[in-house]
Amino acid sequence: MCGIFAASLQQQVANQLLSGLESLEYRGYDSAGMAVLNAAGQLQLVRVAGKVANLRQRLAEQGVHGQLGIAHTRWATHGGATQANAHPHLYQGLAMVHNGIIEQQALLAQAPELAQQPWLSDTDSERLLRWLALGWRQASDKLLYLQQQLASVQGQYSLVLIDQQQPDCLWAARSGSPLVLGRSEQGAYLASDSQALQPWCHERALLDEGAVLQLQGQEWQLRDAQGQQQEPKWQGFSQQQQRVDRNGYAHYMHQEIHQQPEVLASSWQQLMTNGKPRLERLGSGAEQLLKQVKEVQILACGSSHHAALIAKYWYEAHLQLPVRVEIASEYRYRQSVCQADTLLMVISQSGETADTLAALRHARQQGYLASLGICNQAESSLAQEVDYLLLTQAGPEISVASTKALLCQLQALAWLQLAFAYVRQAPNWQHWADQLDALPESISHSLSHEQQIRQWALDLPLLPCCLVLGRGPSYPLAQEAALKLQEICYRPVLAFAGGELKHGPLALLEPGMVVIVLAGEPHLANKMAANIAEVQARGAEVWLLSEGQLPVIANRQLNLAEQDPWLAPLRLLPLVQLLAYHRALSQGELIDQPRNLAKSVTVE
Ligand code: AGP
């Protein structure tokens, strides 16, 4: 998964390409490049391993000139993070940037002559470019040719192509990966998301699935998946798409952790009206839908999956509503059973996670009552494809490690619990509404423990590994804590349900090791106390993050005042976020852009 930025301007293009790439680095940052064409048809290619900053530096040494160019920031899928694998790729006077994954074996089987050629890179993108080049020169209608040639490509892509022999033209296509067209007085642009276009354009239009586009000067020709001429659906930019500043924080992650009380409070205002859940936020007919649901199936990946696991504990205990949760990448490839009146829920911060989208599309064939998405991106593929949408209001989340977006997902899931209860006239909904109302303040209180957590982070030994334990909803919270620590501290951190300890993980314990215990469930306090005793008996230390007292003395303990345990995982979450952040900071890691990862996993 990668970021694409391209432009055809009435001025020099290189600086804008660089800025565009910088705002797309959340999509990948292991290599970057650009190709710029001047009016004489000279193609200038600059590619580097590493971040866009390296590309900027290289361009300062080796300038490029021209008003038309394509640029790319890469997240390696085929081939290492090297200069040779960086985009754009070149072949016979064509240069192309590509986002997505192509089934290259299938491609090469169709054109055995390609398989014999020496390759310049290890990428599927270079194979795709050569496939497109096969009849390119002979094609009189390039757009038609592009569409025909892409019709037999398996995989997903968004791509932009330029041709030395037509230095005023640019071609683009998308299928399965987003691409947005933008325009301004200066010219026309293409980018992987709207946010990258916002500083330069006054309007943008999302390309539809299967669309192909030719841009010649300021003129465009757009065709839909069926080859019919289309007009771009122009829209302005919303407030949320404005560029995000770190406001004095050293890292976006730190800022995003501290934004949580504020975003929860403003989201809450939009979820309620006159003290009641605003059901129309989900779409029309939501009330009837929520009444009809007899079971829920939730699909998601990563942190979004952890949110789903927590909701399962809630809905089954509080609504007696059966919930199945599955990792989207597993669900999409297996035969599953869909009971009557089951609501499909898909959760994704980005709304572009390839496995989650594929799982949603796969599930559509299974006969679910309806699909409901929980998503932070209004323009995402997921937001467009679900029947009902609960848009979270976390605002742009730049750090790869998700913090505020996850907490907003949990708030949304908790709100859905009360919405279910409200339409079913269950008595508890008002009580739950009161608790959610108080949540932003509780999160501020959790954040007030930052200095203590920072000291823990400095002292925490993470080698040879570290364990995190939880029970009940604190078990998925433990999984989230482990994920955060792995993601930005690069250490093996393993999460287990407390009850599983003696089924294997106890063997890992040795003196000096730290086991982080998360405990927010008073009814499980004695059980967790027994687990803590097991750990301490083996000479390992227990560092306890809890809400309410446990009948045990941990080696270290941070105890939040006891409240109704329903939202305890949400109140404990900022503590584990801060622990991971300060640990990574003390190790000197690149916190916002951890190695090998990307914010939005748009490829499988
Ligand atoms: C979270 O810190 C991770 N970066 C990752 O697990 C993420 O939650 C996952 O990739 C799912 O992303 P999504 O919510 O955008 O679908």
Image: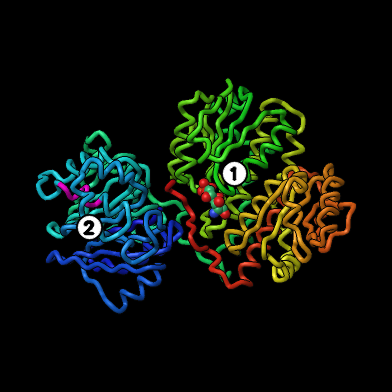
Picture quadrant of residue 76: bottom left
* Coloring applied to the structure: rainbow
Q: Earlier in the sequence, mark 2 or mark 1?
A: 2
Residue 13 at least partly seen: yes
Instruction: Measuring from the top left, give residue 186's x and y in whole percent.
Output: 26, 61
Name the residue furthest bottom. 61
For this rendering, which residue is in front, 136 or 347? 136
Q: CA distance from mark 2 to mark 1?
A: 43 Å
In the rendered image, which residue does mark 1 sit on? 305
Q: Which residues are magenta?
A: 129-134
**Which residue type does callout 2 highlight?**
Pro
Answer whether labels 2 and 1 touch (C-beta < 8 Å): no
Q: Relative to residue 361, is residue 299 drawn left or right? A: right
Answer above or below: position of 84 versus 529.
Answer: below
Is 404 within the magenta? Answer: no
Q: Which residue is located at x 40 percent, y 54 percent?
A: 77
Q: Main secondary structure of the magenta part?
A: helix
The residue lying toward the viewer, choosing from 195 and 599, is: 599
The amino acid beneath tag 1 is His
Q: Foreground residue, 80 or 458?
A: 80
As for residue 130 lying within the magenta part, the answer is yes
For numbered disc 2, what is the local secondary structure? loop
User: Left or right: 565 with respect to 412?
Assistant: right
In the image, taking residue 597 as reference, residue 447 lies left or right, namely: right
User: Would you name the residue on which mark 2 appears?
Assistant: 118
Q: Which mark is residue 49?
A: none
